[in-house]
Image: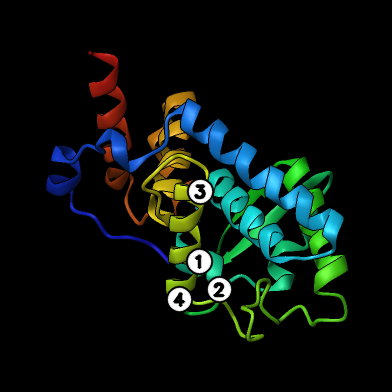
Amino acid sequence: MTEKVTASNTQRDVLSENQYLSDKQLRKLLRYVKKNGDLARRRGSCRSIINELIILIMVNTGLRAKELLNLNIGDVCSTKDTEFFISIRGHTGGISRKMAVPENLAKKLRRFIELYRKGAKKTEPLFLSEQGNRIGYVSIYNKVKIIGKKSGIGTLHPNMLRHTFLFKLYKAERDLKLLQERGGYSSPQAANIYANTFETKRKR
């Protein structure tokens, strides 16, 4: 899936600071989901583990919520050399791009599949609802919203996690073409929102 954003719109658009997480907020969020994920692993339950993986995938890849929801087991088992990739499928079903994930997240994903999706086909959903169906958008939105409140961050929604990844990527690399590729945008001009935000923040 790609987003079409006109140059005029992106050039004047800047993210407000409540649309992405600060470093402090991100650390707080990750501590919270790790604590609950570790507790769930000790208890043998999986709901908090799914919540942890949802947060980790989004802040480490910048996937859109719908892209995450469309992930199948086979999409997260692709390896190249020593790297672990998530294959992201476009709206037509074909692979639109691949995103490398950190080793610690790769290990958690492998472990999750081995324990909680054992025997499932590669074409089956990575994450299931409590009813055994593919998790829907409303469900993931509510999950992230609740996690934000319980972690002490406050307002949190899936797009904030995407914005956080892409803003930090631009801050580190200053490369609009890379941002376009990683973000799945149809035009490099769409990445201007993050460049504009960074430059505005830096001039303060």
Amino acid carrying mark 3 in the image = Lys
Q: Residue under circle 1? A: 67
Q: Are marks 3 and 1 in contact (CB under 8 Å)?
A: no
Q: CA distance from mark 4 to mark 3?
A: 33 Å
Q: CA distance from mark 1 to mark 2?
A: 5 Å
**Residue 175: image x %, image y %?**
42, 31
Q: Residue under circle 2? A: 70
Q: Residues within 10 Å of mark 4 (few under 14, many from 20)?
A: few
- Examine the image and state in which quarter residue 13 appears: top left
* Earlier sequence position, callout 4 versus callout 3: 4
Q: Establish if 70 lies above or below 61.
A: below
Q: CA distance from mark 2 to mark 3?
A: 26 Å
* Earlier sequence position, callout 2 versus callout 4: 2
Amino acid carrying mark 4 in the image = His
**Residue 203: image x %, image y %?**
23, 13
* Earlier sequence position, callout 1 versus callout 4: 1
Looking at the rendered structure, the secondary structure element under dot 4 is loop
Q: Residue under circle 3? A: 150
Viewer-proximal residue, 139 or 183? 139
Residue drawn at (38%, 36%), measured in percent from left and top? 176
Quadrant where the N terminus is found in the figure: bottom left
Point out the frontmost of discs 3 and 1. 3
